[in-house]
């Protein structure tokens, strides 16, 4: 049995040898040490409550902070005549369009949903699954070791596919995505990655504030700086094993640390009578920078810089559980 693999904070997703790196961006929550289900699913459900069951959907609880926002704030089906953007996007500053929600991924040819817990690539997903079938048995405590990996749809493991980004409320957003795959997913949706100034403008809202909700950091308004770090829970160390497919199913106080798209009603960037969800927290989001930059912070990142949050020390092919997708688009003529 192999020993657990450690990696430096900036290990790229693919080593020169072609093997997948198991380390990741050292991102910490309060519990860590400060450093930086589709058709034909393969797995059975986890036997312990460390994870959300087998990728199954979890009903939102009714408290105000986690309830969906009023329709007037973020209408999912606002009339196209009120803006020049597609229905799933928000018009920003009269200049461009931004996805209202962090993206999930589907197969561009068939529309079948990919697992949000694996890279949106047959080769990478299959390799990661094989590696972690062994690695999980030598990392963390006994409960963590007997917790199986989330299901990988049979179609996703069987054939190559083109990822397509989909922005929709109530889904588990796609993590484990490199900048290259994020760009492809947006392109296959007829969109593109946001430029840095576009992303920050959208995050700050029409009142140009440093946080989606105001001028100063308020604990709990966005899904960031959480009370637990998933790698600490699963591996007893927040700095290792950031490609583990189970990380975004880890729970704290009975609920998954990663929330569904649009679930945090207090973290919307307002644009007129519309709004954009989770531009701070939940998942980091790649922007248009071939050198490698993602922004916004993720749920366990110990940062309080809101819309200014930027990580620029990873290669474009890097991925881990915290790296996601949001697309932009030019305004139609």
Image (tube, rainbow, N blue to C red):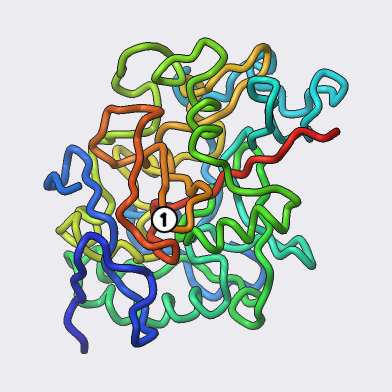
Q: Residue at the location (30% across, 82% down)?
A: 134
Crowding near pointer 1: few (<14 within 10 Å), some, many (20+)? some
Q: Quadrant of residue 4?
A: bottom left
Q: Position of residue 184 (x, y in %)?
A: 63, 61
Q: How many marks?
A: 1
Q: In terms of depth relative to the viewer, which is nearer, 322 or 326? A: 326
Q: Position of residue 187 (x, y in %)?
A: 69, 56
Viewport quadrant of the N terminus: bottom left
Q: Residue at the location (49% across, 58% down)?
A: 179
Where disc 1 sits, the SS reads loop
Q: Is residue 133 visible?
A: no
Q: Position of residue 191 (x, y in %)?
A: 70, 48
Viewport quadrant of the C terminus: top right
Q: In terms of depth relative to the viewer, which is nearer, 96 or 74? A: 96
Identify the residue position indicated by label 1 in the image. 292
Left or right: 2 as drawn, with respect to 126: left
Left or right: 107 as drawn, with respect to 288: right
Q: Residue at the location (62% across, 74% down)?
A: 156
Above or below — where is 99 with respect to 269?
Answer: below
Left or right: 247 as drawn, with respect to 212: left
Q: Is residue 327 visible?
A: yes
Q: Quadrant of residue 24?
A: bottom left
Above or below — where is 313 with respect to 282?
Answer: below
Q: Position of residue 175 (x, y in %)?
A: 47, 55
Above or below — where is 43 with respect to 60?
Answer: below
Q: In terms of depth relative to the viewer, which is nearer, 114 or 296? A: 296
Q: Residue at the location (23% across, 37% down)?
A: 302
């Amino acid at each position: 049995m192999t020993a657990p693999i450690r990696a430096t904070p900036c290990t790229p997703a693919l080593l020169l040898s072609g093997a997948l790196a198991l380390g990741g961006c050292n991102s910490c929550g309060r519990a860590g040490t400060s450093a930086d289900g589709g058709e034909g699913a393969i797995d059975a459900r986890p036997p312990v409550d460390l994870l959300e069951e087998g990728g199954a959907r979890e009903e939102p609880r009714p408290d105000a902070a986690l309830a969906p926002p009023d329709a007037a704030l973020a209408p999912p089906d606002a009339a196209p005549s009120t803006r020049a953007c597609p229905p799933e996007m928000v018009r920003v500053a009269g200049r461009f369009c931004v996805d209202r929600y962090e993206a999930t991924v589907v197969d561009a040819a068939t529309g079948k949903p990919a697992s949000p817990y694996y890279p949106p690539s047959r080769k990478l997903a299959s390799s990661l699954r094989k590696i972690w079938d062994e690695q999980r048995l030598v990392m963390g405590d006994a409960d963590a070791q007997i917790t199986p990996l989330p299901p990988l749809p049979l179609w996703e493991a069987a054939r190559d596919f083109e990822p397509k980004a989909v922005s929709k409320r109530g889904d588990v957003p796609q993590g484990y995505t490199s900048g290259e795959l994020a760009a492809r997913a947006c392109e296959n949706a007829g969109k593109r990655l946001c430029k840095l100034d576009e992303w920050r403008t959208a995050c700050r809202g029409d009142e140009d504030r440093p946080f989606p909700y105001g001028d100063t950091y308020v604990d709990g308004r966005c899904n960031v700086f959480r009370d637990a770090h998933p790698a600490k829970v699963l591996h007893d160390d927040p700095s290792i094993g950031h490609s583990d497919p189970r990380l975004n199913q880890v729970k704290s106080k009975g609920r998954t640390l990663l929330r569904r798209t649009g679930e945090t009603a207090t973290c919307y960037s307002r644009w007129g009578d519309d709004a954009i969800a989770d531009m701070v927290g939940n998942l980091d989001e790649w922007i248009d920078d071939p050198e490698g930059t993602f922004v916004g912070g993720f749920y366990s990142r110990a940062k309080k810089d809101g819309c200014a949050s930027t990580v620029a020390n990873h290669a474009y092919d890097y991925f881990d559980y915290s790296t996601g997708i949001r697309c932009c688009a030019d305004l139609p003529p």
